[in-house]
């Protein structure tokens, strides 16, 4: 699960000494948010002494093996779903949330942040060009297909922030307030046509339906109830179904993925399947035929815990209508977070927060094969591509 924070920082973020980014029309960019404020010590999530600045790593997935092509410093957080990054469809800019920062009054504690960084991916080198304020603990966020609107789930105040977008400039356009500060909005995902969005709420176990009409975003008051603590969510490219993770109680119990039928009105939960402990990221394949999910599988617990396992689990499920069938499974690094697909559906990147790394897997429809490892400067906490 996610927790933690960042030292107060000026809004000018230095660039790391990495190769300059050149984005071409044929490229596919993945952006990883890396948190340096949280480390595991015998199963406990703690703030290290004098943590380094958080970083954002830019990865070219159009080459084999995928490689790092840029890095900037910006506030990030392992608190909240690993969908704390959003990339515009034209890959010209990315948004990254910073949910938590180190408490100025106590460097061993954390407190809610409210910052969203705007990163220009076309700049040479890439750069943070603006920082905007959302609500308390901004976490999962998404940009609509048209690139004109962004929605940000604010976990600590029960709201979703609305931003209009023009020329890579975000302008605050209000909030959706669920009327319950403890509802825990975790992630928000647009339908492909941009007319509806779904919001997971891990505080009161609901998935809310928002209506979107231009810049007007409203709570329809319709909601679904899947499992305990709905968290990450991914919508199929055709907008026919969604898959979400339910984090459960973190006690070592079997947890759940749920399927939403989006062809009916209102949408409803139609299937739920059991998976390993603490499912984090879920992401649809670009063709909508598969969904990848990462389960922490007890890798974030003390080694003496009866449900401890050394590694996380990456599973790929085949989608048959509204049913999920396991297609392949692999174990990888500890404290797993987010996962993304290459546009051809053959390569996956899976984040390990504990290892400060991203494992590279090849998928042939039947088998997941680990083929590489990308080290990042911080705990790999959130990741997206423009196709997610």
Image (cartoon, rainbow, N blue to C red):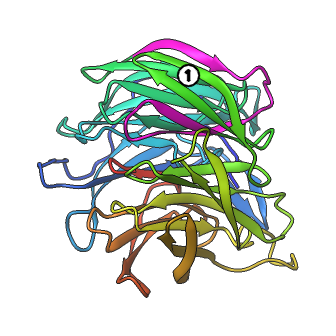
- Figure check: 221 above or below 207: above
Q: Is residue 114 visible?
A: yes
Residue 178 part of the magenta segment: yes
Which residue: 28% across, 24% down? 168
User: Is residue 144 shown left or right of residue 257?
Assistant: left
| Few, some or many residues within 10 Å of mark 1 (<14, 14–19, 20+) | many
**Picture coordinates of residue 13, whole percent (x, y):** 39, 31
When asked about the image quadrant of residue 279, the answer is: bottom right
Which residue: 56% across, 80% down? 326
When asked about the image quadrant of residue 152, the answer is: top right
Taking depth in this image into account, of 180 and 67 the one nearest to the observer is: 180
Residue 269 part of the magenta segment: no
Outermost residue, front side: 264
**Picture coordinates of residue 286, whole percent (x, y):** 34, 60
**Picture coordinates of residue 165, whole percent (x, y):** 34, 21
Taking depth in this image into account, of 69 and 266 the one nearest to the observer is: 266
């Amino acid at each position: 699960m996610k927790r933690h924070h960042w030292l107060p920082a000026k809004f000018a973020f230095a660039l790391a000494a990495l190769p300059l980014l050149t984005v071409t029309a044929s490229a596919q960019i993945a952006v990883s948010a890396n948190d340096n404020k949280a480390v595991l010590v015998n199963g406990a999530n703690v703030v290290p002494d004098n943590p380094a600045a958080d970083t954002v790593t830019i990865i070219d997935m159009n080459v084999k093996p995928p490689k790092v092509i840029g890095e900037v410093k910006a506030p990030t957080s392992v608190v909240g779903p690993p969908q704390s990054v959003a990339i515009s469809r034209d890959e010209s800019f990315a948004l990254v949330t910073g949910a938590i920062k180190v408490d100025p009054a106590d460097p061993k504690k954390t407190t809610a942040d409210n910052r969203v960084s705007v990163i220009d991916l076309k700049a040479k080198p890439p750069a943070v060009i603006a920082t905007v304020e959302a609500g308390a603990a901004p976490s999962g966020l998404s940009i609509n297909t048209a690139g004109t609107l962004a929605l940000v789930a604010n976990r600590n105040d029960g709201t979703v922030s609305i931003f209009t977008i023009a020329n890579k400039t975000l302008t605050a356009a209000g909030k959706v307030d669920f009327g319950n500060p403890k509802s825990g909005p975790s992630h928000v995902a647009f339908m492909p046509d941009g007319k509806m969005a779904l919001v997971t709420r891990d505080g009161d176990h609901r998935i809310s339906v928002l209506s979107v009409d231009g810049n007007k975003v409203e709570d329809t008051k319709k909601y679904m109830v899947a499992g305990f603590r709905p968290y990450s969510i991914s919508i199929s490219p055709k907008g026919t179904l969604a898959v979400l993770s339910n984090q459960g109680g973190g006690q070592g119990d079997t947890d759940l993925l749920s399927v939403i039928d989006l062809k009916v009105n209102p949408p409803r939960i139609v299937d739920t399947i059991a998976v390993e402990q603490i499912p984090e990221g879920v992401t649809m394949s670009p063709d909508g035929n598969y969904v990848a999910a990462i389960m922490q599988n007890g890798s974030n617990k003390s080694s003496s815990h009866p449900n401890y396992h050394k590694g996380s689990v990456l599973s790929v499920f085949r989608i048959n209508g509204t049913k999920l069938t396991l297609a392949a499974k692999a174990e990888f690094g500890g404290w797993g977070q987010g996962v993304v697909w290459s546009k051809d559906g053959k390569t996956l990147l899976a984040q390990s927060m504990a290892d400060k790394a991203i494992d590279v897997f090849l998928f042939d429809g039947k088998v997941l094969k680990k083929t590489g490892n990308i080290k990042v400067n911080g705990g790999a906490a959130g990741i997206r591509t423009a196709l997610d």
